[in-house]
Amino acid sequence: MQTLLLVLDLVGTFVFAISGAMAGVKHRLDLFGVLVLSFVAGNAGGIARDVLIGAVPPPALSDWRYLAVSLLAGVVTFFCYGAVDRLRSPVLMFDAAGLALFAVAGAQKAVALGLGPVPAALLGMLTGIGGGMARDVLLAEIPTVLRADLYAVAALAGAAVVVIADLLQLPFTAAMVVGAALCFGIRILAIRRGWRLPIARQPGHAAAGTGGPDEQRDVSVKGP
């Protein structure tokens, strides 16, 4: 199980690090800034999870592979941004896959350390969305997860499958596959069909779900 969790973590780290690096290039940051964002986007969620459950020092800080994967994603994106940007649809697919991998891996790690069902599900969600939130905060933006698409909802759904399977004593590998598939499916449908949670009505603003200015944003590469 430890090997599987490590592989999921590293793959998810690489995918989300690309999203952070792309955001840095779009904001015209220098190479150092892009690499910082790639590391933050790829690892902040996992670091937050590990600190909260007492798994310190977090692997993202003690295992060189996390840093290497993050920097590799940042360097590739910085010098080959045009090629990566042309792969927007595939990268969005990988982003959804990364969200799914992080959500189920985070929930499984929390469950393995003895956390209850609700905290484990929430930590799985945090693992998936934490990097994207930290990235957006560093760029002085409202975190994407708070204003558009079914991002956190998808991560929570995937994490919940892992937690429920543990309560029912079902095989953890099958649970992680089903949870990741559910998270991935919800996220992809949200992107393609424009699914969003309702937005509160305000005088002088378009009603929620009618395509007001806050809703008509470019769906670009984004992480947890």
Image (cartoon, rainbow, N blue to C red):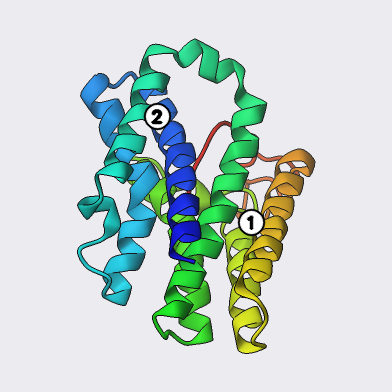
Q: Is residue 78 above or below residue 179?
A: above
Picture quadrant of residue 109: bottom left
Residue kind at label 2, given as amino acid type: Ala
Residue shown at 66%/70% (left/top)? Answer: 175
The tag on residue 199 is 1
Please tell me which residue is depicted at 43% across the width and 75% down the height of the picture: 110
Front residue of 207 and 24:
24
Residue 177 badge: none
Tag 1 and tag 2, C-beta contact below 8 Å: no
Q: Secondary structure at mark 1?
A: loop
Label 2 crowd bin: few (<14), some (14–19), many (20+), radius 10 Å = many
Q: How many marks on residues?
A: 2
Does label 1 or label 2 sit earlier along the sequence?
A: 2
Badge 1 amino acid: Ile
* Of the pair 200 and 147, the residue shown nearer to us: 147
Image side of residue 36 versus residue 152, left or right: left
From the viewer's perspective, is 102 left or right of 87?
left
Residue identified by numbered label 2: 73
